[in-house]
Amino acid sequence: MNTSNGKTFGKDLLGLVLLFIFLILFLMSDRLNDSEMISNLPNAWVNVNTIFLSIVIEAIPFILLGVFVSSLIQIYVSEETIQRFLPKSALMALVPAAMLGAILPLCECAIVPVVRRLIKKGMPLHVGVVFLVAAPILNPIVFASTYFAFRSEQTNTILYSRMGLAFVLSIIIGAILYGIFKNSHQLRGENISLHVHGHHHHHPGDGSSTFFSKIKDTMYHAVDEFFMMGKYLIIGAFIAAMFQTFLDRAVLTAIGQNDFSSTMVMMIFAYLLSLCSEADAFVASSFGSQFTDMSLVAFLVYGPMLDLKNTFMLFAFFKARFVIVFMITVTIIVFASVMVLFGVIL
Amino acid sequence: MGDKMKKYDHSFHAYIQGIILIGFALLILGLIMTGNIVYYIAPSMMPFIYFALGTFFLLGIMQVFRSTKKDSHQDSCSCEADHQIKGPFPVKLLIYSIFILPILFGFILPDRALDSSVAANRGIQYGSGLGINQVSGEGESSLSRAEAYLDDPEGYINSLSENNGETDDIEHFQLEDFYDQDWYDDYYSELADEFAVEDTITVTEQNYLDVMTVLDIYLDRFIGKEIEILGFAYREEDFEDHQIVIARFSMTCCTADAGVYGTLVESQEAKDFEEDTWLFARGTIKKGQYNDFIIPIIEDAYLVEVEQPATPYVYPNFNR
């Protein structure tokens, strides 16, 4: 008994010390910034830090939105409800899924926990994949920002190619992954016995399923999921910040001389930068003079579907083999379809 | 309750997580109070940041209270097993460090705007960055068609139907006519009219990107006009002594999407200023050329060093 008390005390102290450090830093940070030692840091690392924090702070509200939606689903939407709304045929579900993806106003950070939750609730994997790739592009904010970013004549080509491709490709990608994985379990830690075990626990305290306790459940859930996803977001943001700071973009222009290589370069670039889909059009437009419409569309379609930041989050939630197959599929499909669209049709 | 539950100290994890959430909230609050948040986040995204701030405080306090309950895991959800932070002590320490480090970085490292080394890697957009006025090469087609249409709408339509009856071209023209191009040209031609009657074009934070665009499209109307502009100093490697760029970062959401928009300035005093110095320039607009692009150049400029403005970045106002 004594030892366990001592342990608890030590743990409490640890937390208090941490809180104390935060408070001290909160009060002192202005003076710290001016101190000799810290202002002499190499500029490059200050820039990495600026971009890193910028990405993290920017992504946090959207992760929070995502985990709140996810925990609302967890608490208010039952497995039966999802089953009832699903079309009987697996492939029939693809088109409505893409449309639903267009209605969900969630970006690529927020969509990951939501999709995971829905799959846990019994939604088929391939429908989740459609949401994953369609939702970040097909939404009004992205439409507006793409429209305004390309203020010249390119607008219509790029805007409609981006939106059209996102819709069609999400269905194709969903269908391919259905072909490969069917309805197998691809979530990590998908362990039936654990699940039952958990349910078992929930019921004893069930007498209190009041409105208030449901809110509390939602909050607790959100926190747990925030900590689950947050670490991957932070690691992804840090690596993206390194590329953002040290990658010389003139190199890209030098590599991307023809349609083939410039499309490839812009896709790699979209992956590394890990931009929000709301803002990536402005970055793409800054390349407007050096890159073809084809490669810009590839940048704008590929980036929101897949980037460094959300790769980490995907690996957190899905089995590694699934994530790798998903990444390869998305990459090949986007590249091939952009080639076909601009090479053959337009 | 099995052994599993004993091993996982719910209340401790809830407690530490709560404190980390409060730490994030304090970091954001501190940035807002000092105003340094402008280095990280565009003003249009601030409502989301306030949302995050409030949520973090609320959740953080809830977590700390959750931890004081004797057997707190009874309160948690039916899926808690996969939420646990697993692994031996070093792994747990590592995971929590990942959350704590950004908070410490945020507090300890200086809050500074992006500087010219980032600008160099991203590449400066001269003018609006639309690449409209390329001297030669394929870029010409992109806006010259719009210009051709603007100068002589009927002639342009005729030339389209004469030269190529290809459907996609005609379709393209119709789309831009009814939906996009009209609005675009109206907006900038009205702006150009406004600037044209002024004696001196004063570039502010609000109109920065608009002026860049107008100067690109209607450069000929502004040759010989006076212009005043503020930005940080930047030099390309191939610059001569009298050349310098006055530039601003433009940010849409966060610094990851920031681009650099600059204006080439020619002045005898240019060599006296280091990169990243904030400068005010006043000079005359002329038509110049850099890297195969026709760009506006401010010549015979008077340069003076100024304090960095409170908001070092400019923002595209696409919500008009």
Image: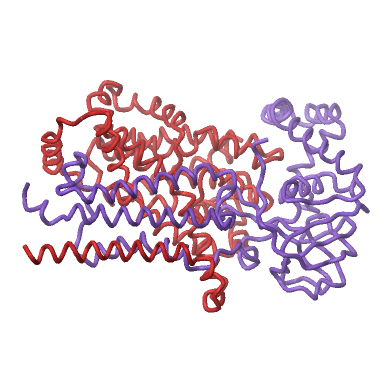
Chain colours: A red, B purple
User: Is B25 drawn above or below residue B156 in the view shown?
Assistant: below
Residue B138 visible in the snapshot: no
Where's the C terminus of chain A, which quadrant?
top right
How far across and how far down the image is residue B75, in percent? Answer: 19, 41
- Specify the quadrant of the image occupied by residue B232: bottom right
Q: Nearer the viewer, residue A202 or A120?
A: A202
Question: Going 72% across and 46% down the picture, which residue do you hit?
Answer: B206
- How many labels were placed on the picture? 0
Which quadrant holds the N terminus of chain A?
bottom left
User: Of B94 and B168, which appears nearest the observer?
Assistant: B94
- Is B290 left or right of A161, judged from the image as shown? right
Position of residue B225 measured from the top left corner of the image (x, y, whole percent): 91, 52
Residue drawn at x 72%, y 69% is B277
Whether residue B218 sits left or right of residue B308 in the image: it is right
Q: Is residue A26 or residue A206 the one in the foreground?
A: A26
Q: Based on the displayed image, in which of its 4 quarters is residue B247 positioned? A: bottom right
Vertical comparison of B36 with A140: above or below: below
Q: Position of residue B276 (x, y in %)?
A: 69, 68
The answer to whether one can see residue A212 in this image is yes
Q: Position of residue B166 (x, y in %)?
A: 70, 29
Residue at 78 percent of width and 30 percent of height: B160
Nearer to the camera, A344 or B310: B310
**Would residue B6 be found to the left or right of residue B141 on screen?**
left
Image position of A122 with respect to A52: above or below:
above
Position of A50 compared to A117: left or right?
Answer: right
Quadrant of residue B265 within the rendered picture: bottom right
